[in-house]
Image (spheres, grey):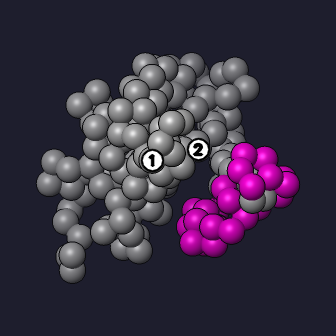
Amino acid sequence: MNKTPRNLVRLGREEDIDEIATIAIQCFPGDFANGTSGEPDIAIAAEWVAHRMRLGDYGKYIVLEAERCVLGYVFYLLVAGVGGVLQLEQIAIEQGYRRKGLGIKLILTSEKIMREHLLRRFGCKLRKVYLTTSAENHAAHRLYAKAHYARYATVTKLLWDVDEEIWVKDVAQS
């Protein structure tokens, strides 16, 4: 894929569930493994996405789309009540479209969408966004640094058998 098609960042919709789930399996196969076989399970991933989508104003999928195909997504979860703090729970770009600037575009544009959503729905400003990532995921660290997140802490084996890092973006300061 030599040329990246024109793309659009928008709120995720119910009809995006299968495409989001497919990308989720591709990027996070262990997160959606069948407990019996240990293999990634598209039904588990689709159910996960569908439940998250039903959070309404409290959790939002934002997708990056080109030519009517979802190429990536980000999921934000409103935390700490309605005080303007979000967790960027997942970001994923389809493998064939990585390293083309789509991740940074998705993060920065989705933050604007969430900033507008929080102000419109809850009357609050976006103050902070935080995320966790494997301490070994150096490509993700470069992306987060480029998006003005700062490494905040390292937690030993928080989720898996590797250390996790917490990254924070103080949006009120940026």
Label 1 sits on a secondary structure element that is: loop
**Are discs 1 and 2 less than 8 Å apart at CB?**
no
For label 2, the residue is: 88
Whole-Å distance between the Cαs marked 1 and 2? 26 Å
Report the amino acid beneath label 2. Leu
Q: Residue furthest left?
A: 67
State the image coordinates of residue 45 (x, y, percent, origin top left): 42, 37
Label 2's element? strand
Tell me which segment is drawn in magenta: 133-161
Q: Earlier in the sequence, mark 1 or mark 2?
A: 1
> Where is residue 3 shown, x and y percent of the image?
20, 76
Q: Is residue 144 magenta?
A: yes
Residues 103 and 14: in front is 14
Quadrant where the image shows the N terminus: bottom left
Q: Position of residue 135 (x, y in %)?
A: 72, 64
For the point 36% across and 51% down, which residue is it?
23
Residue type at mark 1 is Glu
Q: Which mark is residue 39?
A: 1
Other-residue count near label 2 (Cα within 10 Å), few / some / many at <14 / 14–19 / ≥20: many
